[in-house]
C-alpha cells in the first residue's frame, strides 16, 4: 500500500546561547559562539528582544535561525509583547485579571469597545477628556457630595423634571426668561419679590387676595 502522506524534509537544527547586538524592524543580530546570525523572532517568543538580551537561538543547516526565548535582560527596560496580526485572549472559565503596581495605559489608533454585564470603577481621582460624548441609557443614579459643572452652552430636554433641595441659590448675571403654559408658586411662609422696576401684565384679570394688603 502506497504511503499517501508526503514525506517532509527537515534540516538538522542545533541550539545555542547568544547576545542580541542589533535589531531591525523584523530581524535581530545575535552573536553566538558559532558566529553572528541574522535571526527572526519565533512566533512562540512573545517578548520582543532588545539589544543586550541573552537569548536561546535555533539554527538549522540552511542557516535559518530563530530566537526561541529571552533568557536574561540587563537593566530595567520595558518588556514588549509584539504581534503582527490581531490578538485574542480568551478565558473559557474563571476571571481574567490585569494587575499593575505602577499604573496601566491603554492606547489605540482605532476604537476601544467594552462589552460587559456590569462595569465597576473605583479610583481616588478621575479625569475624562472627550471631544464629543453621547450617552444612551434607561436609568441613571448618582450619589455625589459636590458637583461643579462649567459649560459654554447647557441644554436639557426632559418630559418631566423634578428637583428637590434643602436650599437653592441661583445667580443670573444678565437676564432670565421663563415660558410656561401655567406657572404656580406655593410658598409656606413668605414670598418676596424685589426689583428696581416691577410690572405685572395680564390680558384679563389680576387678583390679589389677603387678610391685609399694604401698598406704599
Image (cartoon, rainbow, N blue to C red):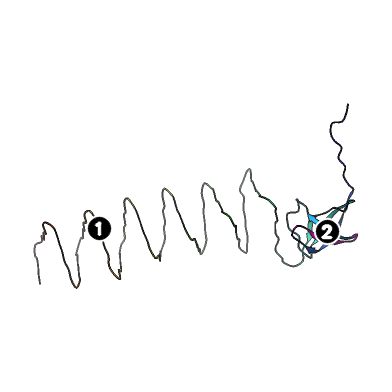
Q: Residue at x 84, y 33 (%)?
A: 5
Q: Residues within 10 Å of mark 2 (few under 14, many from 20)?
A: some
Say if 105 sits above or below 12 in the image: below
Q: Is residue 166 left or right of residue 210?
A: right
Q: Nearer the viewer, residue 31 or 123?
A: 31
Residue under numbered circle 1: 179
Dot 1: what SS? loop
Residue depicted at x 83% and y 61%: 30
Tell me the residue at 83%/58% (across/down): 38
Q: Picture coordinates of residue 28 (x, y %)?
A: 79, 60
Q: Earlier in the sequence, mark 2 or mark 1?
A: 2
Left or right: residue 165 versus residue 92 is: left
Q: How many marks?
A: 2
**Distance between the Cα atoms at labels 2 and 1?**
78 Å
Residue drawn at (86%, 40%) of the image: 8
Image location of residue 144, percent across then percent down: 42, 60
- Give the image location of residue 107, x and y in percent: 60, 59
Q: Residue furthest top?
A: 1
Residue interval drawn in magenta: 25-34
The disc placed on residue 38 is 2
User: As drawn, is 120 to the left or to the right of 180?
Assistant: right
Q: Is residue 28 magenta?
A: yes
Quadrant of the image for the N terminus?
top right
Q: Position of residue 197 (x, y in %)?
A: 18, 71
Amino acid at each position: 500500500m502506497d504511503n499517501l502522506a508526503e514525506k517532509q524534509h527537515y534540516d538538522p537544527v542545533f541550539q545555542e546561547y547568544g547576545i542580541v547586538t542589533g535589531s531591525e524592524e523584523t530581524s535581530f543580530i545575535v552573536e553566538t559562539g558559532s558566529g553572528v546570525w541574522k535571526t527572526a523572532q519565533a512566533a512562540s517568543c512573545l517578548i520582543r528582544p532588545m539589544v543586550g538580551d541573552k537569548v536561546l537561538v535555533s539554527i538549522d543547516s540552511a542557516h535559518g535561525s530563530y530566537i526561541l526565548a529571552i533568557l536574561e535582560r540587563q537593566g530595567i527596560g520595558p518588556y514588549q509583547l509584539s504581534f503582527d496580526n490581531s490578538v485574542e485572549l480568551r478565558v473559557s472559565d474563571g476571571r481574567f485579571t490585569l494587575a499593575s503596581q505602577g499604573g496601566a495605559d491603554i492606547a489605540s489608533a482605532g476604537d476601544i469597545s467594552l462589552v460587559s454585564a456590569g462595569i465597576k470603577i473605583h479610583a481616588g481621582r478621575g479625569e475624562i477628556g472627550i471631544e464629543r460624548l453621547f450617552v444612551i441609557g434607561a436609568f441613571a443614579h448618582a450619589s455625589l457630595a459636590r458637583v461643579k459643572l462649567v459649560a459654554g452652552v447647557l441644554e436639557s430636554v426632559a418630559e418631566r423634571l423634578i428637583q428637590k433641595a434643602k436650599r437653592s441659590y441661583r445667580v443670573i448675571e444678565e437676564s432670565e426668561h421663563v415660558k410656561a403654559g401655567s406657572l404656580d408658586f406655593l410658598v409656606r411662609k413668605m414670598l418676596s419679590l424685589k426689583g428696581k422696576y416691577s410690572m405685572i401684565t395680564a390680558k384679563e384679570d389680576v387678583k390679589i387676595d389677603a387678610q391685609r394688603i399694604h401698598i406704599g
